[in-house]
Image (spheres, rainbow, N blue to C red):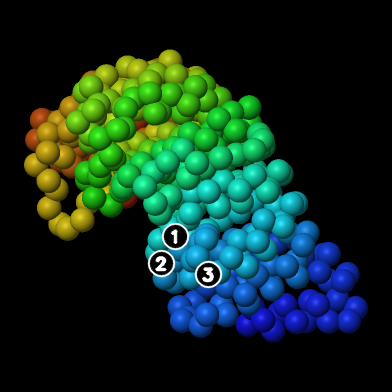
């Protein structure tokens, strides 16, 4: 299909058609052909003025030097100098860190970068020259790149991108983990997140639902505290159960005048909820939640873990919280999994 469309666009008299194409959506189906990368590259090369590109893959892929997608695709993508919005979704995509940095640098107008299943790797022993390097600032407004897992290159990549877009970034999504616990390398420290905390005041939406543990963190579950303390203009906030002190969260967020949506959820695998998760749920105080809703002037939706409702019912305070929500005009929900569609309103 990609090859046929590319030929049509390149046919005689097709120049006007090529220049009118501003948006392209590509689904990469499972295909063992060695020419697949070349066919995709030909299609992208036939649309030189693209402003929006969405790609979806049905299989795990590696992009970059010596990858199964070939260098032709990376080169074609790097020629899209007018690209403003890039989305890549799939089972998992591994990007060579150096190529990834060069690719982003070739998109000087980029405003949206969404790659929720991406992991950047050096593919060799980690060295400074093998990590992401951005040649100049980028006008990025929305970044979605997962934080957790593996050797930590994603954290380095996020830091580099955040620093390059610190004057424009408004929406930051650090991803989620299906497991309750994930881990970074022992080299991970709180200072690695300082760039994120520095842009927190200007963010309109922020998501981080991975629960990350590391022996180097003092204490290991407060790695998001500085970021949450620095929030100022936030409208939508989605958190998991890790990265901060849950007992002080609602007092911490009470001064936020623009907060409209707050979600605290975790996606569990299996029917039962781990005991360590149950302990965290008990730290969500009904009294703190009521006070928070009363002092949050713009709040319209609050989502909490379903297990919290069960604990409150045992303590006979669930009704009080629901009545307070009605009085404050807040839609109170109890759920285990977050629906990201709410972001499209902000």
User: Nearer the N terminus, badge 1 or badge 2?
Assistant: 2
Q: Quadrant of residue 276?
A: top left
Q: Does the CB distance between marks 1 and 2 fall below 8 Å?
A: yes
Q: Which quadrant of the figure contains the C terminus?
A: top right
- Which residue corresponds to mark 2? 60
User: Distance between the Cα atoms at labels 3 and 1?
Assistant: 11 Å
Which residue is at 63% across, 27% downward? 167
The reply to whether residue 261 is in sight is no
- Which residue corresponds to mark 1? 93
User: Distance between the Cα atoms at labels 3 and 2?
Assistant: 11 Å
The reply to whether residue 273 is in sight is yes
Q: Position of residue 65 (x, y in %)?
A: 52, 61
- Which residue corresponds to mark 3? 69
Q: Is 62 left or right of 9, judged from the image as shown? A: left
The residue closer to the viewer here, 179 or 105, is 105
Q: Is 259 left or right of 337, judged from the image as shown? A: right
Which mark lies nearer to you, 3 or 1?
3
């Amino acid at each position: 299909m990609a090859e046929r469309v590319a030929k049509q666009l390149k046919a005689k008299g097709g120049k006007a058609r090529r220049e009118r194409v501003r948006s392209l959506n590509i689904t990469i189906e499972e295909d063992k052909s060695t020419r697949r990368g070349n066919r995709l590259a030909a299609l992208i090369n036939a649309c030189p003025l693209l402003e929006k590109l969405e790609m979806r893959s049905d299989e795990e892929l590696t992009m970059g030097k010596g990858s199964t997608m070939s260098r032709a695709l990376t080169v074609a993508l790097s020629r899209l100098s007018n690209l403003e919005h890039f989305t890549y979704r799939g089972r998992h995509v591994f990007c060579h860190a150096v190529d990834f940095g060069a690719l982003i640098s070739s998109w000087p107008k980029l405003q949206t970068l969404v790659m929720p299943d991406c992991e950047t790797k050096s593919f060799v022993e980690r060295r400074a020259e093998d990590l992401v390097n951005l040649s100049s600032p980028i006008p990025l407004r929305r970044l979605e790149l997962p934080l957790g897992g593996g050797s930590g290159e994603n954290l380095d990549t996020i830091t580099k991108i955040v620093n390059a877009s610190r004057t424009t970034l408004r929406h930051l999504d650090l991803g989620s983990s299906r497991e309750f616990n994930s881990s970074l390398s022992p080299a991970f420290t709180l200072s690695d997140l300082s760039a994120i905390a520095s842009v927190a005041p200007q963010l309109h939406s922020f998501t981080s639902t991975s629960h990350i543990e590391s022996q180097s963190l003092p204490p290991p579950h407060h790695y998001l505290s500085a970021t949450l303390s620095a929030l100022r203009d936030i409208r939508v906030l989605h958190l998991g159960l890790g990265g901060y002190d849950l007992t002080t969260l609602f007092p911490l967020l009470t001064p936020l005048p623009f907060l409209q949506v707050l979600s605290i959820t975790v996606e569990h695998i299996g029917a039962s909820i781990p005991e360590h998760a149950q302990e965290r749920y008990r730290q969500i105080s009904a009294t703190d939640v009521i006070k928070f809703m009363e002092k949050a002037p713009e709040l319209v939706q609050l989502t909490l873990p379903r297990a919290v409702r069960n604990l409150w019912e045992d303590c006979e305070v669930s009704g009080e919280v629901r009545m307070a929500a009605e009085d404050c005009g807040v839609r109170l929900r109890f759920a285990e999994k977050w629906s990201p569609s709410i972001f499209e309103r902000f």
